[in-house]
Structure formats: structure tokens, C-alpha cells
Amino acid sequence: AYHHKKEVNFSDRGMTLEQQINESNQYYLEKGIAVVHKKPTPIQIVKVDYPRRSKAVIKEAYFRQASTTDYNGVYQGFYLDFEAKETRNKTNFPLKNFHEHQIYHLDACLKQAGICFTIIGFTSLKRYFVTPASFVISKWHEKNSSSMTLEEIENNSIEIKSGFHPTLPYLEAVDQFIADRKMNNGK
Amino acid sequence: AYHHKKEVNFSDRGMTLEQQINESNQYYLEKGIAVVHKKPTPIQIVKVDYPRRSKAVIKEAYFRQASTTDYNGVYQGFYLDFEAKETRNKTNFPLKNFHEHQIYHLDACLKQAGICFTIIGFTSLKRYFVTPASFVISKWHEKNSSSMTLEEIENNSIEIKSGFHPTLPYLEAVDQFIADRKMNNGK
Ligand SMILES: [Mg+2]
Ligand SMILES: [Mg+2]
């Protein structure tokens, strides 16, 4: 039987935040727990070659501006939408890491009663926070506010521990958001 | 004041089905009605040039297999997920137009209580149907079934009329699905 020693630290295993989330989404998908995918990078394709006997090759293309966040999907009837961001900072997260279109998109999804958040990774600290979009949006609109302090993030997020299966169990935080919502509006 | 003659036929205006849906999504987004986007085509990028004084150029890339459908988003708290398909056929829609990954994805989203469907356009007839994913999935799994007849589609879909604003008002069909769901399980 499989077991592992409690001392063993699987935490993040050198993966980027996106890799951890992608692996978690794969786990959630395979277990039938949730369907969440990262959106492909939008590309404007200009020139494609179709060589005989082999697959099409894109020869000229350009990156386009995304109009949404990185991830969305469905979990127990709820629409999930989130952006993942990491920083090597140890005391704050600079708001300039968010693009205007991400803030607008999160706001639009919130208005449609989606469950919207960011996953913020402090990679130097190996700490991961699921922060409701409403908090990030309000900070983003705040005058003279260029960052969220770690303390603000601690006070307004659910911290999740990097683990084994899944790597980053962010749905535990989502469960809490859903419970809070049910408490607040009886949905 | 703006008005247009009833005789004028704006119907589809020569647009492809995807163009009609994209324009409708834009309308829904601008009006704050729903947030639905087409997913970018997934691309594997191999080589990128960064010319001085101009933007990055992708010089070698390949199309990757998508793992989801074309569209998803959120509407009044509901997760929407759908695939758009058109045919020039007049009497049936061949099931081979659906890829296995699309069927599996729709099924996985249904299990998470998403509102999942296809928009099928019979372009020669200028008729558009919003067909629940459950019907498409069951036909797809049916032995010896290579297509859905127009009659089957008529009997198992909500037909929508191509119009002006939005071009393809598919949320009218979604409203009906939501009403049916509320009737059936009291959600
Ligand atoms: Mg990101
Ligand atoms: Mg399609």
C-alpha cells in the first residue's frame, strides 16, 4: 500500500504557480470534481504553411491582447473565473501585475454571480492565497494604492497549502466562498 | 429616431455562425447581460523573434488539439458551455462534425451542472438551433447513428431566429433551459 512519510515536503516541487494550478485542474478533471482549464494565449495567425505529408506550420503570427483571465470553468453548478499571479516579493504584491482587462473581466463576471478570485503565489515564501476578486478590484481602484501588502492579503484571502494531490487545492477556498455566499443570500 | 422597415431582412448578413455568435457575445457583454468568450485556438509556440523596435513575431508554431468546446462563460450565475457548428446540408447534421474531446468535455461540464449545448446552423436554410448537449451526447453514443436528422433537431432544440441586436439571440434558448431546470429540480 502507498503511504508517504509526513516529513517529506512535496510542497510545490519547483513548479511554477501555473504548473501547480494546471496539475491541480488535471486532478480535479480526472476525479470528476471540477472542469477548469487554462485559456490558450490568443494569437493572430498571419501565415501558415501546409507541407505535404506533415502537419501545418504557422510561419508568422503575433501575440494578441487577452480579454479575459487565465482560467475559468465549472464546479458544482458554479462558474469559476480566476487569474494566477506570482511574485518573488516577500512583503507585498504590486497591483501593476494586474492588467486593466483582467480587472474589468473579473468585475463583469462578478456581476453575473460568478465565483471570481485570484491565486497569488509568494514564491519566495512558498505561500499561496486565494483572494476574492472583489478585494483585488477595490484595491485596484483605490487612489494612491500601488500594492497589496502581505498583511492585507492574509486578512482578505484564504491561504492554501501546496500539497500532493492536488498540488494546489484551491477548491477548498472555493468551498468556503460558496458557503459564505449561501450564508449571505440563502442561495 | 431610429426604426427599420419590417421587410428588411437582416438575417445573418452573410456572416458565418461564429461571427454571428461573436457579435452576439459582444452585444451581451456591452449590455452587461452575460460574459461569454470564444476560446483562442491552442497553439504550441516553438520559435519567437524579438525584433528591435517592433513587436514579437512568432516564426514557428503548430496547432494543438483543443480539449474543450469553443465557447464558455457566465450568465446570471449559470456556467454556459457550448460548441458552434454549421452545415450546408439541408436534411441532417453529420455527427462526425463533433470531435470526441468536445463530447467528453460537454459531458464533464453537464456533470458539474453547467448549461451545455450546441448551436447548430443550417446555413443553406438559414435556420439556427440551440440543442441541449444531453441530446447530442446521446445521439453520439448511439450505435449506427451517423447523423441527427433535421426533424430530430427540430424536436429536441429551441430554434432561434437570426436578428439584429443581438445577431443570434441564443440566450433566449438558455432562459428556457434555466426555466426547465427550475421546474424540474426546484433549484
Ligand atoms: Mg496569470
Ligand atoms: Mg466549432
Image (cartoon, coloured by chain):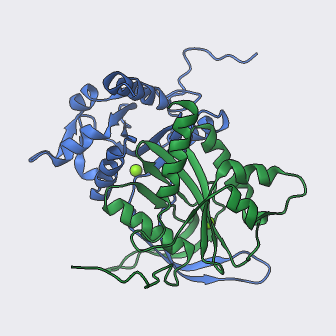
Chain colours: A green, B blue
Q: Nearer the viewer, residue A144 or B3?
A: A144
Q: Residue at x 37, y 24 (%)?
A: B186
Q: Residue furthest left?
A: B144
Query: From the viewer's perspective, is A103 left or right of A18?
Result: right
**As rendered, which of A115 and B35 lies closer to the eye?**
A115
Q: Residue at x 76, y 49 (%)?
A: A138
Q: Is B22 located above or below residue A10 in the figure?
A: above
Would residue B169 be visible to someone looking at this image?
A: yes
Tell me: residue A102, above or below residue A161: above
Of the four image quadrants, the one with ligand 1 is bottom right
Q: Position of residue B30 (x, y in %)?
A: 67, 37
A59 or B143, which is in the foreground?
Answer: B143
Residue B163 location, x and y as percent? Answer: 52, 27
Please give left or right for residue A120 compared with residue B147 in the image.
right
Q: Quadrant of residue A46?
A: bottom right
Is residue A88 placed above or below B24 in the rendered structure?
below
Along the line of sight, the residue nearer the viewer: B143 or A128? A128
Q: Residue at x 50, y 74 (%)?
A: A19
Give the mark count. 0
Outermost residue, front side: A6
Query: Where does residue A18 sit, x and y in percent of width and height?
Result: 54, 71
Relative to B135, B142 lies left or right: left
x and y percentages locating residue A111 in the rendered image: 63, 38
